[in-house]
Amino acid sequence: MIKNIVDRIADRTRWGYLVAFIILLVSYIVSFVATQKLMKESALVNHSNDIIHGLENVVGYVTQGESAARGYMITNEKGLLSKYKSSHNHADSALQHVTIITADNADQQKKMDSLKVLINDKFAWLDYIISIYDSTHSINEKLLSRKNVGVAKMKKVEIFTQQVQNEERQLFQQRNAQLERYSQIIKEVTIISLIAAILLTFYSIITFNKENKAKKEASEKANAYRHQLELRVDELAALNAELIELRNIEKFAATGRISRTIAHEVRNPLTNINLATEQLRTEIAPSEDAEILFQMIARNSNRINQLIGNLLDSTRTSELQHVKSSINDVLDSSLEFASDRIELKQIIVVKDYDKDICPVLVDLEKIKIAFLNIIVNAIEAMDENGTLHLSTENRNNRCIVKFTDTGKGLSKEDLARLFEPYFTTKEKGTGLGLTNTQNIILAHNASITVESELAKGTSFTISFNFT
């Protein structure tokens, strides 16, 4: 159900983004095309303006040249003659500029060629009139009779230029209309995009509120399921820990029963062997070889008896002398007994004690033995410069003591047999140290658990009741 809600939210979100993307993409494409058209038309409008103004400049320079020529002939001032020549050059330059900017239009090029002929003809006529004036330095009948010819030539230039300008003005108006049309398209697209964006914004807000509400409900349900699952996991973990503890107690009790049975069944025959040995000693003549054999029998009988005694001691429930003690002080005392081993292997001891931890009721001597067994095992499992981490804490109203080493660790098979009597991974170990440790811990109504991983180390965790 939660997955369906999440999928529905994701689908709506994807569709919303897809629609928004398509609208924005279409708006962008239309705006881009219209903008390109607008720029093109704007360039054409500017082009028409350049041609119109260029032709105006051409006519202006021709008119200026004609005025300078007339002024020269009236005043005989040489400066006006220079101005005439300059106007001629400017008119040629202005016409050349218009010719260049109309290079892509063959019809306009022909018109420019025609205009050039008219302008050259006009200036050739002015040069001719000036040459006549220069020969007499006076305005005579010959000059006056040719006045109308010059006016007609200028009129041709002006009329032809106006025709070209009028044609270009018509193009200018058409292009300007196109420019306004594309500007209007861009404006309409912008308005439509803005309206679409506003509608999409409202849609997004409404959809977001609905989906957010559904998402919150789904999240609350998921959190409730997760909380229930965590509770179940915690309950299972607690039950599993209790089951392991019960199995350890049951296993320890069974081990004790087996130990007592073995001790009874072994010690009776062992007593008979010792009695028979003493009887043989009195009946056989003394000799060195016989004495060696009697001593061997006695020594091995004592060894067997001692092993049986150690087994019984490690599994027998003994009375405890409880004393209210600080668990931190007990750990420090146990460490002192192993100080020589720690210094020999240069073990790094890290203490992480809870300074405010409450005292516990323990049998000081026995609990020190239990702690010392764990510490010694940790030291022997580590190479030089290993690390032994000791910590105490108050967890769930219980006193937790943890020993962690960086030794070679244990396999799962060895971990399952760790507290069995006579089981050991050490070459010279008896296999009773941790059995005795478990006996002491259980006698304190405490629990002991072990975690280990090969090549990473082992952790012993002991949990005591507070006083």
Image: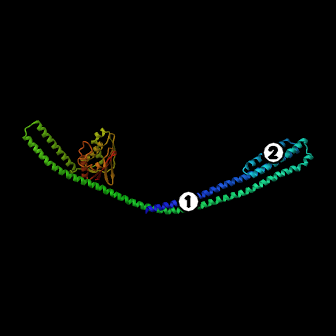
Residue 9 in the image, given as x and y percentages of width and height: 48, 61
Q: Label 2 amino acid?
A: His
Q: Residue at x 79, y 54 (%)?
A: 163
Residue 11 in the image, given as x and y percentages of width and height: 49, 61
Residue 77: numbered disc: none
Callout 1 crowding tier (Cα within 10 Å): few <14, some 14–19, many ≥20: some
Residue 130 vertical position relative to residue 192 in the rendered view, above or below:
above
Residue 302 vertical position relative to residue 167 in the rendered view, above or below:
above
Residue 227 vertical position relative to residue 416 in the rendered view, above or below:
below
Q: Residue at x 77, y 48 (%)?
A: 95
Residue at mark 1: 20
Q: Label 1 amino acid?
A: Ala
Which residue, as the protein is rendered here, is positioned at the far right?
141
Q: Secondary structure at mark 2?
A: helix
Question: In front: 44, or 457?
Answer: 44
Image-quadrant location for residue 19:
bottom right
Number of numbered markers = 2
Q: Is residue 390 visible?
A: no
Residue 323 in the image, given as x and y percentages of width and height: 25, 50
Sequence-wise first label, 1 or 2:
1
Q: Is residue 141 visible?
A: yes
Residue 88: numbered disc: 2
Image-quadrant location for residue 237:
bottom left
